[in-house]
């Protein structure tokens, strides 16, 4: 409370009457601008409380008359992006792979879309640069297990390889050792014969002629007479320098003894058709498309 009777001699302002060691507290009013800002913030807080979600309750919160939600706003934003992509993607949905390949705009969109989808879904196995690793084929080169045309790649991605899809690409190389179709000597002979097809050096004590016979009898039906491979069966070409499971003698013997049975999941139900098309275009354009 102001004591109007008690005026400070120096400033001429009334004091509150409080005094410490002879120093008196002046009773200056709050500055007007401060008061207005203060009142304005009270009004604003009430308005905010009415309009926006603000007040925490036991299990919920007041939602405000606007019903605004950052989560809903973010989702709407996201949906707008998806819709915009769907409009762009619509061209892709209706076009054939060849048409997309021939249309620069659609091609650019498919490449960007395919690259993103590759990073999300394929890179864990094929590597972020699609260069693969042991057991996971390099998709950059022009060596194809199941075919490198646009359609073949699209089909591989859609149905998978030895996957759970009914339509999966699926050829099982026999486990010649485990299933006792060949003995150890024959396996070593044929393994080194196969290695010799791509110019690898083979140990002097191996009978390559016998190996060639084992190959003709057991392997040529899938891998071709000269080891040129057969894409309808996913049987790799064996007379080139590209090896999925390793080219040293021990690795090839292991392949022939137990077979490998590489598995690639089916993407048909998991990715939409436009994404699969984009992936086929992207993989095809990595360099080795046929
Ligand atoms: C779980 C691991 C895995 C994932 C994930 C995966 N792949 Fe594969 N992929 C494989 C394996 C293993 C093979 C080789 C199978 C074989 O031996 O025939 C393969 C083969 C392929 C082939 C055939 C290559 C050829 O030479 O014919 C293509 C094309 C391919 N993958 C594309 C993709 C794309 C695109 C994706 C992402 C949508 C993908 N893969 C995701 C494991 C995977
Ligand atoms: C029924 C068809 C079939 C027959 C028969 C067959 N293969 Fe295969 N072979 C395949 C398939 C399919 C693959 C791919 C394996 C995988 O990824 O599971 C393969 C893979 C291989 C590989 C691995 C190539 C690499 O790049 O690493 C070698 C080596 C091989 N076969 C050798 C042989 C030999 C030797 C025989 C005969 C003794 C034989 N195969 C018989 C289908 C066959």
Image: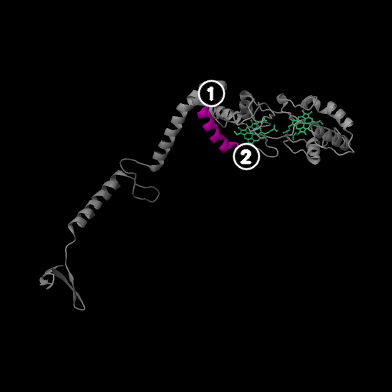
Q: Residues within 10 Å of mark 1 (few under 14, many from 20)?
A: many
Where are the magenta residues, as a range?
107-130
Locate residue 209: give its quadrant.
top right
On screen, residue 95 above or below 111: above
Is residue 24 a member of the stretch shown in magenta?
Answer: no
Indicate the quadrant of ligand 1 in the picture: top right
> What colour scheme has been applied to the protein in the rendered image?
one colour
Please identify the quadrant where the C terminus is shown: top right
Who's the residue at 61% across and 40% down the image? 124
Is residue 115 a member of the stretch shown in magenta?
Answer: yes
Locate residue 180: give its quadrant.
top right
Q: Which residue is mark 1?
A: 100
The reply to whether residue 277 is visible in this rendering is yes
Depth check, front residue: 14 or 215: 215
Mark number, residue 127? 2
Mark number, residue 243? none
The reply to whether residue 179 is visible in this rendering is no
Question: Residue 74 placed where, x, y %?
Answer: 41, 40
Q: Report the side of 10 relative to 74 (left or right).
A: left
């Amino acid at each position: 409370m102001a004591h109007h009777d008690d005026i400070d001699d120096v400033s001429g302002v009334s004091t509150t009457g409080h005094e410490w060691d002879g120093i008196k507290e002046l009773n200056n009013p709050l500055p007007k601008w401060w008061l207005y800002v203060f009142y304005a913030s009270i009004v604003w807080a009430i308005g905010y409380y009415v309009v926006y979600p603000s007040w925490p309750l036991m299990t919920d919160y007041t939602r405000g008359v606007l019903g605004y939600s950052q989560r809903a706003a973010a989702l709407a934003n996201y949906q707008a992006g998806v819709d915009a992509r769907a409009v762009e993607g619509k061209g892709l949905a209706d076009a054939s792979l060849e048409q997309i390949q021939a249309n620069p705009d659609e091609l650019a969109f498919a490449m960007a879309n395919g690259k993103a989808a590759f990073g999300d879904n394929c890179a864990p196995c094929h590597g972020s640069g699609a260069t693969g690793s042991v057991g996971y084929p390099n998709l950059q080169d022009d060596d194809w297990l199941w075919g490198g045309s646009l359609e073949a790649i699209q089909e591989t991605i859609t149905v998978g390889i030895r996957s759970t899809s009914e339509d999966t690409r699926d050829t099982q190389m026999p486990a010649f050792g485990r299933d006792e179709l060949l003995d150890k000597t024959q396996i070593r002979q044929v393994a080194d014969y196969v290695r010799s097809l791509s110019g690898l050096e083979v140990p002097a004590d191996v009978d390559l002629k016998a190996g060639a016979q084992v190959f003709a009898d057991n392997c040529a039906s899938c891998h071709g007479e000269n080891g040129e491979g057969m894409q309808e069966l996913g049987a790799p070409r064996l007379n080139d320098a590209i090896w999925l499971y390793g080219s040293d003698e021990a690795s090839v013997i292991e392949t022939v003894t137990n077979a490998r049975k590489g598995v690639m999941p089916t993407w048909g139900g998991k990715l939409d058709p436009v994404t699969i098309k984009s992936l086929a275009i992207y993989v095809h354009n990595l360099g080795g498309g046929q």
